[in-house]
Image (spheres, rainbow, N blue to C red):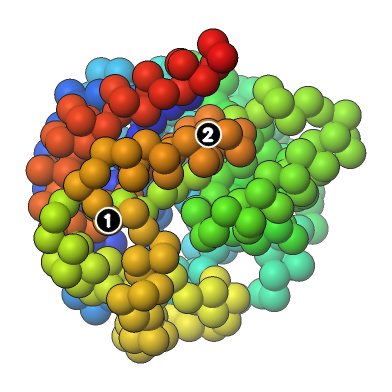
Amino acid sequence: MLKLGWKAGPEQYQPTELLDYVVAAEKAGFETVDVSDHFHPWSEHGHSCFTWAWLGAAAVKTRSIELGPGVTCPILRYHPAIIAQAAATIDNLAPGRTYLAVGTGEALNEYSATGSWPDYPERQAMMAEAIHLIRELWKGGEVTFNGDYYKTRRARLYTPPLSRIPIYVSSLVPESAGFAGMHGDGLITVANGLENAKQIVRNFEKGAHEIGRNPSSMPRLIELSVAYTDDRNSAIDCFKKYWAGAMVPAMFNLNLYTPKMSELNGSVVGMDTILKKTCISTDPDDHVELARKYIDMGFTHLFFHSAGPDQMDFIVKYGSHLLPRIRQMHAQEAVA
């Protein structure tokens, strides 16, 4: 089932402002939201609230919209038992509309808060163990766990989840997508070119098949950067000011751990790169075509990320003008 969502960016907005936006997003017809979970923002100009506290507030401020982190890293600054407890609590506040999305993190958040930054293979092994422990704790019984990285002693969630919480695993490059297919209930990624997305999907499906799972029944989530405005320069300036660091692969691989480092790294991102990675247009057909390409690729949840210049205007107009057209396009193609 297709779900159209809004990307909440605490790296850019204060938490109270962000709450106003999620309420507006639900009213505008967005069905799901993913919110970044960062210790540091991508830029010195940004913000960085505690996402799990914000999710609790969003859960009681809304009634129907699906909620989850996009994504959280449950292996270093968080112990997986704490993430199991946090997600279970959100599900008690928003039963049946809570999900957990996890990734191996960035030094921007993990090294800065813990002083630890293992290499990627070790972080991936930690992730596999963390996912297993979280699922065990969600069952509600006592868990004594002796892993290579984590240990618990008769740990129990006395407020377990009310619903089955799906775990979506992040993959930004094809090489990690097989892991997502093997360990996750679904995939979450960020659009970085059609060919990259196609290869991620192929490897995700291959990983699922390898352990006897049916990937066609597994959700695939993707963030798409858009701006529904005729003020192209302001939209580009907003993406560059707050998000340029996230557009450079080194931020996900190297030990770059301060917003200043991210900002300097992102300074190489020019207008051409931003235009290539985003859909900035007031023509609804451009946005519908963008959505169609990823829906045809098999993605089931599309999160639309706008950096500005006017977030509330984007939410209201995208909900009114674009979401119905995308749903209509999808319904027509499904019938055909």
Q: Are marks 1 and 2 in contact (CB under 8 Å)?
A: no
Q: Please name the residue shown 41% across and 49% down the image.
A: 224
Q: Is residue 300 left or right of residue 52?
A: right
**Hey, what amino acid is under mark 1?**
Ile
Look at the image and tell me whether residue 272 can be seen. Answer: yes
Where residue 206 sits, quadrant-wise, is top right
Task: Give the camera-side residue of 317 and 170.
Answer: 317
For the residue labelled by badge 2, is the local secondary structure a helix, a strand or a loop? Answer: helix
Residue lying farthest to the top in this orientation:
335
**Hey, what amino acid is under mark 2?**
Ile
Residue 8 image position (x, y, % from top left): 29, 47
Residue 275 image position (x, y, % from top left): 35, 66
For the residue labelled by badge 1, is the local secondary structure a helix, a strand or a loop? Answer: strand
Task: Give the camera-side residue of 309 and 288.
Answer: 288
Q: Residues within 10 Å of mark 1 (few under 14, many from 20)?
A: many
The mark that comes first in sequence, 1 or 2, is 1
Where residue 249 sits, quadrant-wise, is bottom right
According to the picture, the residue beneath numbered tag 2 turns out to be 295
Q: Which mark is residue 280?
A: 1
Q: Please name the residue shown 27% across and 73% down the image.
A: 240
Q: Please name the residue shown 36% across and 58% down the image.
A: 278
